[in-house]
Amino acid sequence: MVITSKQHQQHRGTIRAMVALMITMAMAGALSACGLGGDQGSSAGSSDHVTIAAIYPKTGLYAEYGKMFQQGFDLAKDQVNKKGGIQGKRLDIAYYDTQSDAKQDAAVAPKIASDKSVIAVVGDYSSPASSAASPIFQQAGLVHYGFNNSSPTFTNSGDHVWTPQISQKINQEVNAEAVAKRAKKISVVYIENDWGKESYQYFKEAAERLGVQIVYQSSYLPDSTDLTPILIPAKNAAPEAVVDIGYGPDGALIANTLRDKLDYKGPFFGGQETKEFLSLTGANAQGAIITGVFSATGTKDAKAKAFVKSFEDRYHTVPGNFEITAYQAIKDLAYAGEKTSPTREGIQEALGKVKDFPLYQGRGGTFRFNTKTRRADTIKPILLQVDQGKFKQIEE
């Protein structure tokens, strides 16, 4: 669906809220049967601690992302507590495995909202899943911090829904600029969900403005296992580059199909910065370009370098985009609680008025939120390219 006006966006937000509430009423009674209880219990009413709830994919198709998120969350939480917590209160994280599925997000949201020790919520991986829970948190006056949610309409559910994630409008403009420097005729495939359709529309508008001709385009269903039927005509259109707008597993399937089955040798834009993507594609990922928010080897920001060292010391691996955004989410909310109070009201107040949140992404420094959009408009993406099995920052 193409977003054409502010009125249309608001209408969609209302529909999403109604759908989420209907799902919640239908499924709330089945919480225990669904196994959606938090991995770590919280004791509402305790005065010596506060809790951030994390909705994330511990299992399922996107479990790779859940693992990376939890590493970032836990590292940040332990650092916060080592420095005395938030205004002297120990910080806990209560984990809820949703598999990044909209129905599960909507089902578990009431349980989280009713836990008075929870001062904020982080997650989920996908924007559609997160958006299913947002109306419940909004109604409860609980900040929903969608740190990984780049859909331009994500914050439409209400004034308690925030994200520091770069919007797809900005991401796809940078993506189109990178493509335009390398190709003038392209084939584009994109995932068939709200995020994918919105992202493709932004990419298309930017590409056409830059003089890039899209000679073939097609969407594909999430969880697809064979995309040959749409990739054959994509290749046969004789593009100078193929662009995928989707998630990591999709990008791996597309890259492997293009390289191994269809003998496509041109530039490929797609995938995500994960070990899973690199291991699934192997040599087929060589040269792939994506937009990103962080480079462990390219960052020049002192606090980001300190994060990289702490992460490597603890997990014995190099962090990437998903680990840093999860880490920063906890740091952001802890910083907010220190500036005001570690309460639901305090977090909401701080996100609207604090002007110097420490920024670990991009080129570092600090950031603030646009209080009208509840997005961090000043964070800019960077370009990453696969070289010899590793994503490396490239300057253009």
Image: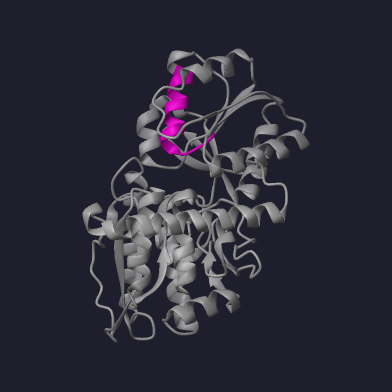
Which part of the image, by quadrant, shows the C terminus? top right
Residue 331 in percent (x, y) is at: 43, 69
Quarter of image, res 245:
top right
Task: Provide the major secondary structure of the magenta segment.
Answer: helix
Residue 118 in percent (x, y) is at: 36, 74
Residue 48, compared with residue 109, is above or below; it is below
Residue 286 in percent (x, y) is at: 47, 28
Residue 65 in percent (x, y) is at: 37, 47
- Asked if the stretch drawn in magenta spans residue 248, the answer is yes
Q: Residue at x 60, y 66 (%)?
A: 374
Q: Residue at x 34, y 71 (%)?
A: 79
Q: Residue at x 46, y 76 (%)?
A: 335
Residue span colored magenta: 245-259
Answer yes or no: is residue 347 visible: yes
Which part of the image, by quadrant, shows the N terminus? top right
Residue 230, compared with residue 106, is above or below; it is above
Q: Is residue 214 left or right of residue 108?
A: right
- Asked if the stretch drawn in magenta spans residue 47, the answer is no
Answer yes or no: is residue 325 visible: no
Q: Nearer the viewer, residue 308 or 223?
A: 223
Q: Residue at x 25, y 52 (%)?
A: 34
